[in-house]
Amino acid sequence: PDASPTPDPTPAPSPEGTTPEPTRSPQVSPTPEPTLNPTPSEPVTPSPTSFPTPEPSSPEPTFDPTVTPTLRTDVPTDDPTRAPSDEPTYTPTRNPTDEPTFGPTDEPTPGLTDEPTLIPTPGPTVSPTQDPTADPTVDPTSNPTVDPTQDPTGTPTGDPTGNPTDNPTSTPTINPTSAPTVSPTDAPTTSSPSSSPTPPRPCDLSPAQRRLQIFEELSAVTSPLILADSNTVQGMAFNWIVDEDGMELCPDSPNLIQRYAMAAFYYGTDGDDWDECFAGDVTCGDSIESPFFGQVPYLSRISECDWAGSQCNGVLRTVLRAVRLGDNNLGGTLIPEIVQWKRLRDFDLGSNRIGGTLPRDLGGWERLETLILRDNDFTGDIVPLGDLPDLRDLFLQGNKFDGNIPPSLGGDDSVLETAQFHSNLFDGSMPDTICDNVEPLGSIEILTSDCLGTNPIIECSCCTQCFPGELTCGGLSPQQRREGIYDELTQVTPPPVLDDPISPQGMAYDWIVERDQMALCPDSPNLIQRYVLSSFYYSTGGDNWDECYADDPICGDSPESPFFGQVPYMSPVTECDWAGSRCRPPDGGGGGGEDP
């Protein structure tokens, strides 16, 4: 229609131009469809009236209301119009449709409606879920409503509610806060990102799991009570393996036991007091003259096979074969865990200050070939050494070992070639099983003991060399004797020169203490004289002399020799009888002798 219907009917019919009666009589009921053309039997008005008729043509409308208004007002359309009217009707339809006319709009209405919808929906369109949905119920916004905070809130607001309500509430339960709970920080919590990503956890275990499982593995070789005590050397080694070792071994690492035993050995021998290659020694391995040249300090983060004095073999060079730490100021005692080096072949701890007894399970070194423990402070018996089937070279001189020498060191299956027992506290006799194995009957080439003197401590008719059997020098131990002689000789030779094993003075000192059968004492009146003569021998290439070099079997035999009737240098008699030497009595009389 051209104009919206008036809210009320007109007060009176128009005064003129009206028909006295309706054009057509109303039918009993409306036709099911609107007529397309007027009925020819009834005249029609040429055009619609300007005003509505005063009375309706019937008490009921002619037709059911159309779904949509007609597009034209002058002539009815054949079909209902399809487009809605420009303006909404002022009154609602008499019967609401079952479904809305249109789907929801893309955008909400610009403002609130004056009245709510006539009939509310019976409930929420969808029942509430018991748990929050995985995705938001509507498409996310392109940007967050409020910028996120840079740090999470200090603590959660509270525990979640048990279950959602059956119907949504008309207003939110709690009004949103005007600002975040915690203000964002001005800058990130760290000054800058780390240079590398956080490394994965060692062994794919938590620190507590790794510690517990390593503890269980090491408990197979060390008592748990000892291992758990951080004051024991084993406890210190365990804590180092777990907390400090840069290799970060796992409970199933094949070298766990070996590395642990080496760390415990370090702590047990006063490792921090070693002369060279103690933990953190920055000069370890630098000197080409050092026996540890090219190696690294103990407790370094790399393979223990590269630690000073260590040598490994095997397909991957991971099995410990040798430990050589002689003359390096090792102290303390030997711990029993070293027997875990099952394939050890060479063990050299000579010329140190290690004390205590030998571990009882050394027989576990079934492949050991060389054992050098000379010049230490070991005590007790050497029974454990009788169970080493591959032992070839044994150096025990200069300690305080006591008891009997075990017969099991000899026998038909023995491969022993060198056995030095002298300068100890052994007693009894050399076992027949050992004597029967001395050349030419067996494999032993060198056999020494304290068998010298009229009343020797050891009875040995088969020894290749005998040493004084009593406690020498007024009851001094071998180590005390060595230290006393050293102190005396430093009065004529600087200590650095005397300490150098390849200097003539160092070789002479070693010979005086270890090989000279005269067994001089620190207070012997001829100590300095004999030391100077032996230093002279080494400094002049004595082993290359034409005559009377050490052990020259024909020295002094020829009447034509200037050394006729004398003995070779380094012989176990007074140095006054050495070739080319002459001495006078201490008082200067008795025949007018000459100075040497």
Image (cartoon, grey):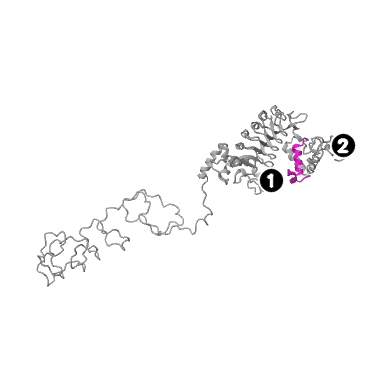
Kindly give the residue lying farthest to the bottom in the view shown: 16
Q: In this rendering, does residue 232 appear at all?
A: no
Choose between 262 and 562: the one closer to the eye.
Answer: 562
Q: Which residues are magenta?
A: 492-517
How much space separates mark 2 and mark 1, taking CA atoms? 47 Å
Report x, y in % for residue 352. 69, 40
Residue that mark 1 sits on: 290
Residue that mark 2 sits on: 560
- In the displayed structure image, the side of residue 526 where residue 237 appears, left or right: left
Report x, y in % for residue 384. 64, 32
Sequence-earlier tag: 2 or 1: 1
**Amino acid under label 1?**
Ser
- Point out the frontmost of discs 2 and 1: 2
Image point (16%, 60%), residue name: 33
Which secondary structure dominates the residues rendered in magenta?
Answer: helix
Image point (75%, 37%), residue name: 515
User: From what the image shows, is residue 494 above or below residue 20?
Assistant: above
Image point (74%, 39%), residue name: 482
Query: Mark 1 packing: few (<14 Cα in 10 Å), some, or many (20+)?
Result: few
